Image (cartoon, rainbow, N blue to C red):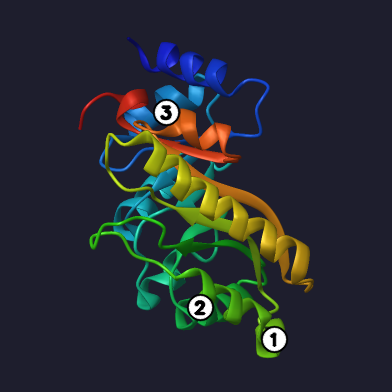
Amino acid sequence: MSIQNNLDYFNQQIKNTSAKLLAVSKTHSTEKILEAYQANCKIFAENRVQELVPKYEALPKDISWHLIGTLQSNKVKYIAPFISMIHSIDKFSLLEEVNKQAKKCDRIIDCLLQIYIAEEETKFGFDFEEAYQILDNHNFENLENICIKGVMGMATFTENTQQIRQEFKSLKSFFEKVKNNIHKKNINMTEISMGMSSDYQIAIEEGSTYIRVGSAIFGNR
């Protein structure tokens, strides 16, 4: 199957749903990304800043770049001028650094809080209570150059679809709780980033607005 055919397949899967397709291009060449771009895919996600920056520099500037991997505070400055959304905010100190670098670039950077919903030690993120307290704190409003657009989560890697569904439900429930109860100028809850190649169908059913798909579009790395 070609990249074009793979994109057509996933676009058909998300048709008439709330989900958007996020093409995970990590470790794939600029040539493959350009092939997807020419097939009308304009939203790509990378895991590592050191891979993202040269791709941004080499590829068309109307691409919307998202970062979905672990972000170190000292790397924020390299992506602050152009990044469309950071999905992997997992510490308040990181949010402060994003705000600082966004201010230098005279930008407001959209961010998602990464929430720990899985039963795996390899996954990471805020727990629900910790994330809620950060957003509810009056000092949070001082971060004028970021906007919290929603949440991101990764389900447990398991064949137990009921467990996956329950984890996605918990993330959607938290999203709704924040949306309905915390009203601040730098919070605009619209996005739920959940679901990958193996579980995107369940994620869509549970309200995902971004499904993150890599190898099923680009082929094996």
Q: Secondary structure at mark 1?
A: helix
In the picture of the structure, the residue carrying the numbered disc 3 is 34
Q: Secondary structure at mark 2?
A: helix
In the picture of the structure, the residue carrying the numbered disc 2 is 130
Disc 2: CA contacts within 10 A as few (<14), some (14-19) or many (>=20) = some
Measured as percent of width and height from the top left, residue 58 is found at 40, 43
Front label number (1 vs 2)? 2
- Is residue 186 visible to the viewer in this orientation of the structure? yes
Among the two numbered marks 3 and 2 on one chain, the one whose residue lies closer to the N terminus: 3
Picture residue at 41% right of the left edge, 22% below the top: 35
Image check: 42 left or right of 180?
left
Picture residue at 60% right of the left edge, 60% below the top: 174
With respect to residue 216, does 115 lie above or below?
below
Residue sticking out furthest to the left: 221
Q: Amino acid at mark 2?
A: Glu
Among the two numbered marks 1 and 2 on one chain, the one whose residue lies closer to the N terminus: 2
